[in-house]
Image (cartoon, rainbow, N blue to C red):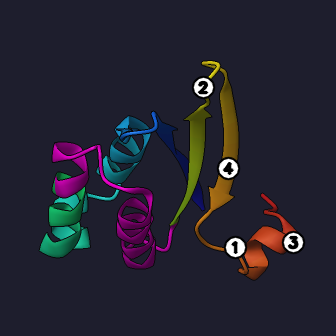
Amino acid sequence: MDKVVVEVMDKGDDFDVDLSALLERLEKYDWPERLGASIKASLDDLMAAPQLDSPTLLAKLEELQKTCPDLQISVQETHKDGDGEQQSESSQLCEDTSEESQQGQAF
């Protein structure tokens, strides 16, 4: 299973979303053809408007996660507080419950 982290910088008024790692990984999956037009539209929305509010962003990423189960997407949110310090929190959109990950891979 591929894992990718989407970085979200909360600047108070808006969010900066770094989708470069996600897009790079999706290219391995021939994403426009395989994932379908609705997911491509969701990605285009994310690219065009990185200031999306957090619930909208998470909903779009969860939709993408369901469409591409081979990809495990985590969101890392970084908040800038009043002192300019950054605080990070990471959340995983899906639980990996496949037997393969629990038993490891043998070659």
N-terminal of the two: label 3 or label 2?
2
Q: Which mark is residue 90?
A: 4
Q: Which of pointers 2 and 4 indicates the residue nearer the eye?
A: 2
Which quarter of the picture shows residue 67? bottom left
Which quarter of the picture shows residue 54? bottom left
Residue at the disc numbered 2? 82
Q: Residue 96 carries which label?
A: 1
Dot 2: few (<14), some (14–19), or many (≥20) neighbours within 10 Å?
A: few
24 falls in the magenta region: no
| Residue type (three-letter) at the residue carrying disc 3 | Gln
x and y percent of residue 82 in the render?
60, 25
Estimate the spatial distance between the alpha carbons at disc 3 and disc 4, rounded to whole Å. Answer: 25 Å
Q: Which mark is residue 60?
A: none
- Residue 76 vs 87, above or below: the answer is below
Q: In which quarter of the image is the N terminus?
A: bottom right
**Residue extent of the magenta highlight:** 45-70
Residue at the disc numbered 3? 103
Identify which residue, 19 or 98, lies in the foreground: 19
Per the image, label 2 sits on a secondary structure element best described as loop
- Residue 33 vs 74, above or below: the answer is below
Which residue lies at the image location 53% right of the left edge and 49% below the top edge?
4
